């Protein structure tokens, strides 16, 4: 969900959460979301564990 949000223009963890909320119906066709879309905090914590030196959303690729 983070990758899709960033591709669609999200630049903050909150924008990634908002992307998920806006696209929840479509996302549920292929993702199990029994508790709905996670808030911005779980996205940040999960990615901080993968790359502790970075605590910002991934940068958008240059066009």
Image (tube, rainbow, N blue to C red):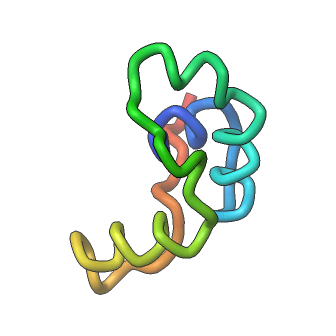
Residue lying at 34% horizontally and 78% vertically, measured from the top left: 48
Give the number of callouts: 0
Q: Is residue 24 left or right of residue 60?
A: right
Q: Is residue 48 left or right of residue 2?
A: left
The residue most toward the left is 50
Seen in the picture, residue 4 relative to 10 is either above or below; the reply is: above
Residue 1: x percent and y percent? 48, 40
Instruction: Say which quadrant the C terminus sits in.
Output: top right
Seen in the picture, residue 5 relative to 26 is either above or below; the reply is: below
The residue most toward the bottom is 53
Residue lying at 56% horizontally and 75% vertically, measured from the top left: 41
Seen in the picture, residue 35 relative to 34 is either above or below; the reply is: below
The residue most toward the front is 34
- Residue 11 lies in quadrant: bottom right
Residue lying at 61% horizontally and 66% vertically, measured from the top left: 40
Residue lying at 25% horizontally and 78% vertically, measured from the top left: 49
Q: Is residue 10 left or right of residue 6?
A: right
- Which residue is at the front of the view, 18 or 9? 18
- Which residue is at the front of the view, 54 or 18? 18
Residue 57: x percent and y percent? 52, 62
Residue 23: x percent and y percent? 69, 27
């Amino acid at each position: 969900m983070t990758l899709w949000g960033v591709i669609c223009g999200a630049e903050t963890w909150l924008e990634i959460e908002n992307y998920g909320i806006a696209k929840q119906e479509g996302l549920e066709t292929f993702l199990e979301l029994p508790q709905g879309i996670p808030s911005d905090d779980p996205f940040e914590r999960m990615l901080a564990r993968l790359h502790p030196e970075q605590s910002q959303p991934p940068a958008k690729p240059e066009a």
